[in-house]
Image: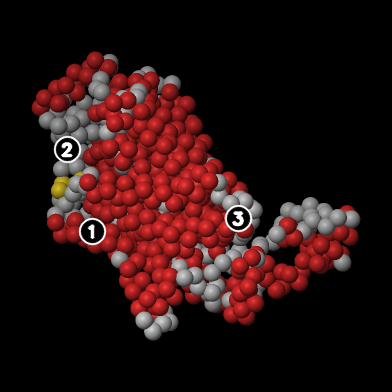
């Protein structure tokens, strides 16, 4: 009895409280709910919140853009987020296993895996570039401050120094304005940060097909970033759940530091006003609503498979409805907050140069690695601010990368499901990391930036919209909205609110379809600065996009072929209806209509096996605790 009492006090349990243990002993669970929320926040809040939303906001009407943005959040973002979380949590399976709900649609899960693979490959390359700038910032003078470096050209015009062929002494803002005017009349100004980015870091080639040699510094940083991701996921959610206490929270500390520094600068108010001043006439433009819907959709990470995967490690009765609202609002609030940080600095830079804010504003890699680093050179102790900024980018990227890698690993492990692959899950994680590193090597060549942008524009664009739309239709109309609402009520103790029921059935699919149409109408062939991608490269981009979508019809055909039945309709019906093992993973949760087949599942489903020792220990734990303070508090007995 003494031994059992000691066992009940492990893992931070106080006397009289049962030992905290996983509900699902085979797959494991989050250590606590904070770990899940922080991981999901880290997954949703990524680089796009910093380098895309502020640009979209000022381009689409400033403060007026907030109105369609939050409308889309309410009617599309939060409902889709809640749907994916509840889907994964109910089945306790990754993006493949959940499609026991309707096996014919399992291709959606494979499509999510393909999308996560593409994003995981190029996303870690962006992280590796941030690592490179992070290390480059550890010197007294930032290397992109002046134009007196070997890689600079005669067109380089630094903010803090004259061009190489002039001896002007810049002491006032008027001097800088005069220099800027003179430069604009003679040649196009290129900043030292832009030349550092293009001519030194990337050493960019002239064509996407001209790979050149591998940039060894970038290759080393790529290896470092994959090692960091692997070590943080070496024990799955058990290790990553601890890491996110830092990676998901510290970016907000950095944002706050940069915000306080930014608003104290001269000209910062102009930048913030440029960011927020509403242009209400733009609300009537379809493009503004399309950009708002697209930003919400892509920012929350819907249809990547990560939300389903992360939620699958929740305990069955976790309130994912509450979590979905918290995480979605946090994500959008972070985007708005980041806009203040970005435009306060850009406003200061525009004031220093004597130009309009629109001339220094940028998005994507151009903001993160050119415009903002140049603005940082104007600050006292510029290396410190640069280190903080790029460290924040690294953490934002890692938070998303953790979930992308875990999505792939969980899908593989759940699909095979044998004891040996669960035992050697770390080896699977290592294998996926090594493969991701190898596929990322071409992106560290001199043509790497072209391929990175190609993957970013095509691999995860309209394909995500199609996948999400089919997923909504499959759950609401094939499996049936009544069945799904009953599943959620069984899991949470209450049905989804009427608003979410309406959104899932009508509004969200309609908005997703609108995003798809908008994406097609607004399509323009990709270009990078003045470089126009050749037709063969754009063809490769479309093939990457189709490679995830094509999984859906291909698997549907295979599923129908394998299904039982004498006629096509019989095979189709058997392929559409839920498989026998669909439902909660653990027998103790299989109640109602799932209880009828629980006995059959217990004989054949490996998910049920870990429950046996757990159930046997329940009474022991309860008796042990009762002996210590007269009351039984078994965490598992709440079910």
Q: Foreground: 415 or 157?
A: 415
- The answer to whether residue 61 is left or right of residue 581 is left
Foreground label between 3 and 2: 3
User: Which label's residue is closer to the chain start, 3 or 2?
Assistant: 2
Q: Is residue 20 visible from the viewing direction of this image? A: yes
Measured Cα–Cα span from mark 1 to mark 3: 41 Å
| Label 2 sits on residue | 153
Q: CA distance from mark 1 to mark 2?
A: 36 Å
- Compared with 224, 259 (above or below) is above
Which element type, helix, strand or loop, lies under badge 2? Answer: loop
Q: Residues within 10 Å of mark 2 (few under 14, many from 20)?
A: some
Q: Is residue 474 above or below residue 506?
A: below
Mark nearer the N terminus (1 vs 2): 2
Task: Name the quarter where the N terminus is drawn.
Answer: bottom right
Q: x, y (%) of residue 470? A: 37, 59
Q: According to the image, label 1 marks what residue?
A: 542
Where the C terminus falls, by quadrant? bottom right
In the rendered structure, find residue 489 and report the number of the disc placed on it. Answer: 3
């Amino acid at each position: 009895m003494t031994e059992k009492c000691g066992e009940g006090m492990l893992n931070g349990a106080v006397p009289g409280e049962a030992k905290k243990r996983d509900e699902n002993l085979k797959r494991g669970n989050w250590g606590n709910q904070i770990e899940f929320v922080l991981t999901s926040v880290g997954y949703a809040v990524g680089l796009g919140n910093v380098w895309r939303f502020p640009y979209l906001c000022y381009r689409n009407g400033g403060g007026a853009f907030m109105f369609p943005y939050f409308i889309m959040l309410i009617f599309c973002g939060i409902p889709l987020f809640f749907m994916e979380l509840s889907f994964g949590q109910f089945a306790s399976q990754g993006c493949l296993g959940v499609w026991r709900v309707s096996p014919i649609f399992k291709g959606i899960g494979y499509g999510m895996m393909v999308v996560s693979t593409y994003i995981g490959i190029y996303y870690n390359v962006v992280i590796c570039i941030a690592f490179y700038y992070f290390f480059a910032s550890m010197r007294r003078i930032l290397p992109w401050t002046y134009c007196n470096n070997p890689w600079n050209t005669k067109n380089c015009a630094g903010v803090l120094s004259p061009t190489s062929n002039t001896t002007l002494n810049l002491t006032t803002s008027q001097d800088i304005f005069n220099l800027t005017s003179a430069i604009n009349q003679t040649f196009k100004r290129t900043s030292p940060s832009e030349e550092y980015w293009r001519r030194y870091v990337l050493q960019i080639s002239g064509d996407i097909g001209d790979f050149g040699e591998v940039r060894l510094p970038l290759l080393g940083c790529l290896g470092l970033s994959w090692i960091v991701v692997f070590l943080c996921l070496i024990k799955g959610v058990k290790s990553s759940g601890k890491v996110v206490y830092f990676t998901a929270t510290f970016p907000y500390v950095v944002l706050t530091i940069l915000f306080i520094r930014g608003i104290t600068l001269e000209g910062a108010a102009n930048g913030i006003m440029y960011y927020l001043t509403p242009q209400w006439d733009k609300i009537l433009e379809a493009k503004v609503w399309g950009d708002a819907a697209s930003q919400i959709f892509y920012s929350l990470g819907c249809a990547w498979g990560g939300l389903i995967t992360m939620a699958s490690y929740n305990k069955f009765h976790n309130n994912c409805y509450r979590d979905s609202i918290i995480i979605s609002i946090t994500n959008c609030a972070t985007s708005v907050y980041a806009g203040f940080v970005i435009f306060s600095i850009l406003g200061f830079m525009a004031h220093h140069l004597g130009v309009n804010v629109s001339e220094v504003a940028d998005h994507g890699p151009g903001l993160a690695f050119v415009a903002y680093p140049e603005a940082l050179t104007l600050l006292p102790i510029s290396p410190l601010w640069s280190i903080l900024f790029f460290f924040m980018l690294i953490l934002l990227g890692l938070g998303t990368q953790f979930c992308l890698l875990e999505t792939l690993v969980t899908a593989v492990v759940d699909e095979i499901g044998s004891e040996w692959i669960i035992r050697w899950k770390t080896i699977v994680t290592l294998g996926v990391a090594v493969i991701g590193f190898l596929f990322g090597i071409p992106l560290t060549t001199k043509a790497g930036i072209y391929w990175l942008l190609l993957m970013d524009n095509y691999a995860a664009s309209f394909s995500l919209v199609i996948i999400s739309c089919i997923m909504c239709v499959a759950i609401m109309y094939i499996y049936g909205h009544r069945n799904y609402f009953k599943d959620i009520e069984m899991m949470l103790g209450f049905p989804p609110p009427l608003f979410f029921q309406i959104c899932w059935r009508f509004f969200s699919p309609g908005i997703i379809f609108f995003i798809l149409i908008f994406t097609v109408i607004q399509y323009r062939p990709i270009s990078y600065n003045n470089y126009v991608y050749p037709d063969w490269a754009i063809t490769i981009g479309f093939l990457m996009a189709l490679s995830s979508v094509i999984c859906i019809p291909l698997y549907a055909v295979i599923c129908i072929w394998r299904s039982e039945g004498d006629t096509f309709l019989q095979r189709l019906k058997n392929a559409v209806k839920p498989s026998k093992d669909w439902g909660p993973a653990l027998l103790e949760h299989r109640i109602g209509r799932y209880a009828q087949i629980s006995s059959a599942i217990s004989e054949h489903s490996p998910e049920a096996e870990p429950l046996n020792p757990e159930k046997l220990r329940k009474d022991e734990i309860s008796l042990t605790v009762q002996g210590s303070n007269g009351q039984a508090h078994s965490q598992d007995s709440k079910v």
